[in-house]
Amino acid sequence: MRAETDVVIVGGGLAGLAAARRLHRAGVPWRLLEAGDRLGGRVATDAVDGYLLDRGFQVLNTAYPRLGTLLDLDTLHLGWFTSGVLLRRGDRLDRLVHPLREPGGAPGTALADVGSLLDRLRFATLAAGCATLPKNRLLAAPETTSDAALRRAGLSDAIIEQLLRPFLSGVLIDRELETSSHVLAMILRSFARGRIGLPARGMGALPAAVAAPLPADLITLDTPVAEVGPRGVRTRDGDIACRAVVVAVDPPAAGALLPTLARVRMHSYTTYYHAAPEAPLDEPILLLDGDRRELVANTVVVSNAAPGYAPAGRHLIATSVVGPSAPPEPVIRRELDRLYARSTADWEHLTTVTVPDALPAAPPPQGRLRKPVALGDGLYVAGDHRDSPSIQGALASGWRTAGAVLAQLRAPG
C-alpha cells in the first residue's frame, strides 16, 4: 500500500489528542481515528435538563505540568474547590484545610481531633517534601505501596484510617491503597502545588480545548479500528497505510489491538448525581466518611464550585463509590442523610454513572512511571497506563509517544 499519511493515531482521548498536537506542531502528516462519536475518551460531560454531568466525578489540577503546553487554562473559566476536606465522624464534622491557601482555617485544622498533632505535622512534612524535592529524587526513593509509605512516614492508624484512606481511595480509586508510593508522591506533589477546579462547561471542555487547534478534517469519528500493523491500520471502510501507528485507546482496547501488551488491571468507579432545591453545604469542599462505612468515597456540592453545572435555583451533588459493586441509590441516599446530617427526601436522583475502566491500577513496581511506548516496527502505545494513572499521565504519555515517533521518522534510512 502507498503511504496515505505518516502517522495514524488510534483513539481520540487525551493521550491521542496530545500526540496529535505534537505531531501537528512538528509539521508531520497524521490522521486520528476515534471509534466513538466524540473526542475525550474517559473525560466527557453530558448535558441533561440543564445539568452538566461528567462521566464520573473528575477534577482538574492546575499543577499538571503538561496542561500549560497544550492549552490556556483561563479559557476554561475554572471554578475552584476549597483546598481541604470536611470529615464526618458520628455527630462531629471537622474541617481540615491547606493552611497556606486557607489561612483562616489553619487554627481549626491544627486543633482537629483527627489523629494527633504529631500526625498532622508529619503529614505536612511528607506533603512539603513531595512538593519541593526534585521529581527525579522522589521517583528514585525505595518503592512500596501507598499504605506502607504513609506508615513509613510515621503516620498513625488513626489519621490513615479516619482521613487519608477515605480521601486517597477516591483519588486513586483504590480503597486498599495498594497503588505505588511513586504515584502517591506525584499525587501529593500536585495537590500541594496546584489548585483543584472544574471547567465552567464541564470536564468535557478539557479535551475540546486540547483538540481546538487541530484541523477537523484530520479527525474521523465513528471509526473503530479492527487491526493494526507495522505500516497501517484496518477499518470497516478500508485500510490506511502509514509509517507509524500510535495506539492511544484505553488499556482493555489496547490489549485487544496489541496482544503482546501486558494486561492492565482497571479500577471501577461509580458516581451518583442528585439535584436539590437547597445546597446541603455552602462551600465547594469534599465531604469524607471518617467512620469508614466503606460505601461513599466522597460527596460534594459540585455547583458550589461551578454554578453552571446546575440550572438557576438548583444544586448538583456528586457522590462517588469505589469498586465494581454499585449499591442501589436508596442505600447511597441513606448514607447521604448521615453524612450531610439532613434529610435528602426532596433530592432528585438524576442518574448513576458507572465507569468500569476508570483508572489503571498502578501497584509497585512502577519505577519512574515511564513505561516503554515504542513496541518496534513502527508501532507505539500511549495512555495513562504508560505514565501515571491521571489526566497528567495521559497527556504526558501522548506527548512523549509523539516524540518517539518523530525520532523514528527523522532517523536516517
Image: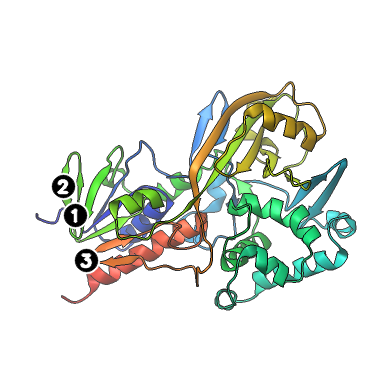
Labelled pair 1, 2 in contact (Cβ < 8 Å): yes
From the top left corner, tell me how far across and down residue 368 is, in percent: 50, 72
Residue drawn at x 59%, y 48% as measured from the top left: 59
Of all residues shown, which one is farthest toward the top?
Answer: 346
Residue 100, relative to residue 41: is it above or below? below
In what element is the residue under mark 3?
Answer: loop
* Residue 394, horizontal then vertical, whole percent: 45, 56
Q: Earlier in the sequence, mark 2 or mark 3?
A: 2
The numbered dot on residue 239 is 2
Q: Could you tell me which residue is drawn at 72 percent across and 24 percent down?
A: 277
Q: Position of residue 163 (x, y in %)?
A: 76, 54
Q: For residue 331, what is the image quadrant?
A: top right
The residue nearer to you, when weighing 127 against 154, is: 154
Q: Residue at x 35, y 65 (%)?
A: 373
In the structure shown, which secondary structural element does the residue marked by tag 1 occupy? strand
Label 3 crowd (10 A; few <14 / some 14-19 / many >=20): few
Q: Which residue is mark 3?
A: 377
What separation in Å lies between label 1 and label 3 (alpha carbons)?
11 Å
N-terminal of the pair, mark 1 or mark 3, is: 1
Residue 232, disc: 1
State which quadrant residue 404 falls in.
bottom left
As drawn, the residue found furthest toward the left would be 1
Q: Amino acid at mark 2?
A: Asp
Relative to residue 303, is residue 161 depicted above or below?
Answer: below
Which kind of residue does numbered mark 1 sit on? Gly
Q: Quadrant of the C terminus?
A: bottom left
Asked if 277 appears above or below 91 in the picture, the reply is above
